Every structure is written in structure tokens, then in C-alpha cells.
Amino acid sequence: MTQRDGTGSCAALLKSSTRTEHAATEGALLPIIKNAANQADYAALLQLFYLVFAPMEKGIRAWVNETHFPDRSRRRNAAFLEQDLLQMGAPVPRVTGSSVQPSFHQALGALYVLEGSTLGGVHIVRMLRSKMTLPEGSTRFWEAYGSERMVMWQRFTTRLDELVPGEAGAVISGARAAFQYFQQAINAFHEQSTAQFR
């Protein structure tokens, strides 16, 4: 989930303003990745991300579309997780609700968190592959943009700067809420895992 400064000042401001939330989320997620020992654990990790991305994307779509980001259809989304889970022969979790975004600019903050997570995908795959063999075609979510990863991030942050003027506070609020949503999902994952061994 590594995030870096983009070319626009909004990305830099978001990074500095959400440093605590980002560190807490990453700190909660890393043990799950490090403790993944087999393909069943990997499938569970994909399911966890799906339970975060699918409802958050649904809430974001209520406000953000191709008018705001012309390359929106090219960007990584929960459908990539569905494909990876199918390659793993694992069920796709059922998601009925959405993570409600109160405003357009708060939705942009949530989108910043989802897009920023693409920067750490290659590192996650490297960690997992050091411990297990991952089926071919089961890492599309992590490697979505391939060699264009930084190019896509720079395009995103440039466009974000164009959409944000005067509303940085709302965008920061949306990003913080997104990190908190991610942490809640991770906590639920830990509780479920703990319950299985009681």
C-alpha cells in the first residue's frame, strides 16, 4: 500500500495529511501478507481486498465517472479481484451494500486511497511469491498497470489537482474515512480468523 507524492500538490498534501491513517492501515495489513503461507491464505487476502474495494467503488461511482477521469474504465477495480479469485477457484464474497460517500470531493479522497494502493501491488506480489507459487493469471489486481504503474499514478494526481481547488479539506476527510474503512475490514478479518481457532 505504499504511496508516493504525485506531480500535483494535492497528492502531496493528502499524503502528509493521512500519514497516520496510512501507517495504521499498512501496519494492520502487513502481518496478513507476511503470514500468508499457502494458496488458501492468498485467496483469503484477495477476498479481504474485495470486501473493501467493491463497496467503496460503488460509493465512489455515485459521484465520479469518466467525465472526471476519462481513463476511468482502464483503471484497476474490483472486477480484477473477481478474475483473480476465479483463477484461484475461490468464491467471490457477496457484497450487498456500499461505502457511502457524502460528497464528490470526499469520493475523490476515497479514490485517492484506492489508486494509491496500486503503487504497493508489485511489492505485495513479490512477498507472496517468495513463499508460494501463485497460479498464472491470479495476480492481475496487484499488477494491473504493469510498467505503466507510475504513469497512471501521475495522470491520476494531475487530474486530481484540476478537480480539487478550494476543497482540499473534504478530500482529506474522504481519504481518512477510506483508510478507516480499510482498517475496519482488516479488524473483521482478524476476528474471523481468530474465531476459527477457538
Image (tube, rainbow, N blue to C red):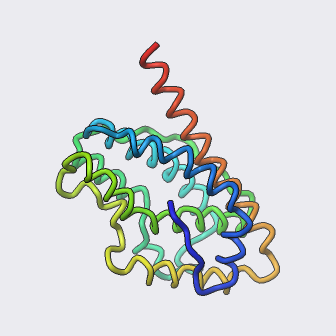
Residue at coordinates 22% horizontally, 49% vertically from top-left? 87
> In this orientation, which residue lies closer to the viewer: 180 or 37?
37
Count of labels in the image? 0
- Image-based side of 172 in relation to 95, left or right: right
- Counting from the top left corner in percent of width and height, residue 116 is at 53, 67
- Counting from the top left corner in percent of width and height, residue 106 is at 71, 64
Give the residue at the far top of this rendering: 198
Residue 49 sits above or below residue 141 on the image: above
Residue 78 sits in quarter: bottom left
> In this orientation, which residue lies closer to the viewer: 113 or 53?
113
- Image-based side of 128 in relation to 132, left or right: right
Residue 113 sits above or below residue 89 on the image: below
Residue at coordinates 32% horizontally, 74% vertically from top-left? 146
- Counting from the top left corner in percent of width and height, residue 179 is at 63, 53
Residue 21 sits above or below residue 51 on the image: below
Residue at coordinates 52% horizontally, 83% vertically from top-left? 154
Residue at coordinates 63% horizontally, 49% vertically from top-left? 24
- Counting from the top left corner in percent of width and height, residue 70 is at 50, 82
Residue 6 sits in quarter: bottom right
